[in-house]
Every structure is written in structure tokens, then in C-alpha cells.
Image (cartoon, grey):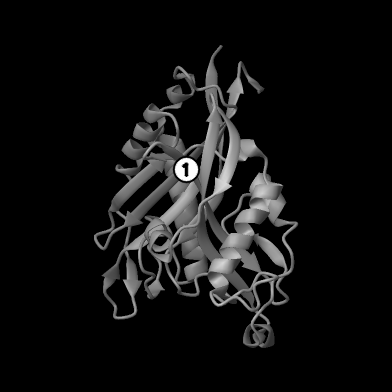
Amino acid sequence: MKQTLLAITLALFSMTTQSQIFENTVYADLVYPGCIRAKNKARCMNNKLAQFYLQNLPKDYFEPMEQVDGKIYCYIGLNLLFDEDGNFVHTKGESASLDALDMANLTLPRMNMPKDVQNYGVSSSFRSVLRYELILDGDEVKNVFYRPLSSEEISDLMGGSELEITKVAVYPGCKGSDNSKLAQCLQQSIMDYIVENMDDRIANLPGVQESVLNIHIYLTVDPSGRPADVKVVNKHEKIREEVERVIKTLPEIEPAVGSDGSPVPLRLSFQLKYSIRYGGERH
């Protein structure tokens, strides 16, 4: 039965920068309940969030992404937004539809917020990466264990040390000077380009039985405006190769600009979700 790629939804999009791309947002030291007295509050928050997702996400959400020394891992990239009172608002870059991660996030406990942030009445963002080790039974996830990442590993997965920038990378056709709107345009343009240029025959590849394909993508817009350090994670090799092929044909992007006025690399990460129709009907 013929399968066709129907749609694409952005579930996660994050950029390695501390600039205020989203207005009235700061990267604050949020504190998870129970971590107030912890020496390393960020590590404590990571651990608490990791356990929270273990309890609130279905096992089939944890899709195999990487195999190292015989162990299978998956990663969850976080870019969570909280209001001035510490209540979860949304995941930056989320789509209009809620997936399992977004639904779980809606039940997150209230975070303890720094008083200076509360006084300004602005929202706060928490960004990190969580790693889980998987035990498989055939193709199904039988069990999931949290395996903490070091700060260096988190930094590497998020694109290295964070860079101060004054202007985000600009995709051809995106106009204006507002960083928030430029970032949204960059995000949408890359998504549209991938959708328009991928060969939809990949939905008919042997072994592709999912109704939704989860594809995790990491790439850097280098100082020359070209994609670099591209990493695509999906269990189907042909799908990984096709996504990499399309990304490498992206048009030249105007690079991000640092505080000294020079071009700087900008690391992007996002999750693509393809919905597949079977014989004209949603599976």
C-alpha cells in the first residue's frame, strides 16, 4: 500500500545563544522543588526533570537514537519556558499540536524563581539535554534508565560553549531587525525547505512501519552561512542520509553576528515529526 509523507511538525527548536531572541525572556537559575539546598542546583534540576519524564512519558516515546559500546541511548532536548511565577508556559518552538512531551510538561510542578526575575515580571527559559539508556525487546523499548550527562557533554550536544550574539542568522527572504521574528522565520524556512526537498519515497522504504517518523537534527550555521557539523538521528539509515542530503543543499544563510560585529557560528537543534498516510487515510 502506498505511503506518502503528509505533514511535518516542529517539536523542538533551540539555538545556542544567550541573547534575548525571545522578548522578555531570560536564562535564569530556575530551581526545581526539592533542589533549594542542593550545591549544584542545575544538576539537581536535570535529575528531577529526568525522573519526572520517566514517570510521565510512555515507553514508546523513548526512541533509540545512538548506540555506544553496546548500549543504546536516546536524548531529550529541553527548551522550556516558565512565567514569572515559575509555572510552565510552553516549549519554545513547539507546534500547535501537543505531543507526549508537551502534555507531560503541562503537569510540571511550579519552579522556584529568582527574586530579581520575579521583580522584572519576565519569563525564564531552562535549556538542557537529558540522556536515557534503553533496554530493547526486539524493536520495542522494554525499560528506560536515566544516565546523567556531564556539563561538558551537555555543552557539546547543545553546540559547545554559548556565544553572545546581537543578531540571529537570517534565512534568504526573512526581513526586519527584530531577532524574535527573524528566529521564527529562520526556523520555519528551514522546516519548509526540508519538507519541500525530501524525497517522499522514503516513506515506502523497507522497515518503515511507523505512522509518525521522529527525526532529530543538529546542525551549525557557520560564519560563512553554510550548514556544518550536521548530525541526523533516526533508526533508519536511508532516512538519515536523505535528511543530511537535503540540509547540505540549503541556500546560503546570512550568519549570526557577535557583539564585536563579526560573524559567529550558531548551533541549531530540532525534532521533525512526519505523519504518514496509508492509502489516503491517516494510519
- Residue at image location 47% in from the left, 62% down from the top: 183
Kind of residue at disc 1: Tyr
- Place of residue 133 in the rendered image (x, y in percent of width and height, measured from the top left): 51, 44
- Regarding residue 251, the answer to whether it shows in the image is no
Q: Residue furthest left?
A: 224
| Quarter-of-image position of residue 257 | bottom left
Q: How many marks?
A: 1
Q: Relative to 4, does residue 108 appear above or below in the rendering?
A: below
In the image, is 45 to the left or to the right of 178?
A: right
Q: Relative to 38, does residue 73 appear above or below in the rendering?
A: above
Asked whether 131 or 103 is in front, the reply is 131
| Quarter-of-image position of residue 92 | bottom right
Asked whether 44 or 124 is in front, the reply is 44
In the structure shown, which secondary structural element does the residue marked by tag 1 occupy? strand
Asked whether 156 or 183 is in front, the reply is 156
Q: Relative to 11, does residue 263 appear above or below in the rendering?
A: below
Quadrant in which the C terminus is drawn: top right
- Residue at image location 43% in from the left, 69% down from the top: 17
Asked whether 33 or 217 is in front, the reply is 33
- Place of residue 87 in the rendered image (x, y in percent of width and height, measured from the top left): 73, 68
- Place of residue 131 in the rendered image (x, y in percent of width and height, measured from the top left): 50, 51
- Residue at image location 58% in from the left, 68% down from the top: 44
- Regarding residue 276, the answer to whether it shows in the image is yes
What residue is pinned by disc 1?
73
**Label 1 Cα neighbours within 10 Å, binned few <14 / some 14-19 / many ≥20:** many
- Place of residue 57 in the rendered image (x, y in percent of width and height, measured from the top left): 67, 45
In the image, is 135 to the left or to the right of 86?
A: left
- Residue at image location 50% in from the left, 22% down from the top: 208
In the image, is 16 to the left or to the right of 142?
A: left
Q: Residue furthest top?
A: 1
Q: Relative to 273, does residue 32 appear above or below in the rendering?
A: below
